[in-house]
Image: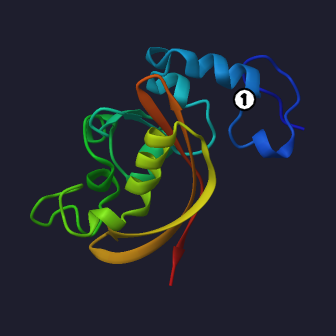
Amino acid sequence: MKKCRFCGEDLDSSYQRRGFCDECYSLLLETPERFKAEVLDYIEVPMMVINVDDTTIRTANDKLLKFVEKSLDQVTGFLGGDVIECIHAKEDGGCGGTIFCNDCPIRNLINKTIKTKEDQKHKTLIQSIKKNGDIIKIELEVSTKLKNDVVFLQIENYKTLL
């Protein structure tokens, strides 16, 4: 059985990918400034921290950087569609400003989290992105949590759809 990376408590299967027990995870979320990329790297799934005011990415962990094949400098301060290379992000208006953005499942999930102040857990989303010049669809299992002035977004699972 896996243990919490901070306190060593046994984790049941629902928390093993996150890597922290509820108590330690809540403690870490209390002060977003504590969530530097090095701390986020302990989380075993891709995670980003999103600013509530403008929905740009404040920081991200190494798993997210690997997933999007970018450096932290190429992610910090950018909108999610630019980072994951949404097929509409390069159109007139850019990420958040095209006619397609109202139907963006990731954007809508983040906005729902901000508006309702409720965690969104294990939501399945489908997103079209560009990868190595090709347009592909990916299925993401995502959870979000609002804390202070940020939204924590975890990609718990993902796969390419045919």
Q: Where is 107 relative to 22, above or below?
A: below
Give the residue drawn at x 30%, y 32%.
Answer: 53
Where on the picture, by quarter, is residue 119? top right
Indicate the position of residue 97 as horizontal and vertical percent values. 18, 57
Indicate the position of residue 81 as horizontal and vertical percent values. 30, 56
Circle 1 residues within 10 Å: few <14, some 14–19, many ≥20: many
Give the residue drawn at x 83%, y 20%.
Answer: 8
Left or right of 40, for residue 65? left
Indicate the position of residue 91 as horizontal and vertical percent values. 14, 67
Give the residue drawn at x 60%, y 58%.
Answer: 123
Q: Which residue is mark 1?
A: 20
Chosen colour scheme? rainbow
Q: Where is 81 relative to 55, above or below?
A: below
The three-letter code of the residue at mark 1 reads Phe
Q: Secondary structure at mark 1?
A: loop
Left or right of 150, for residue 56? left
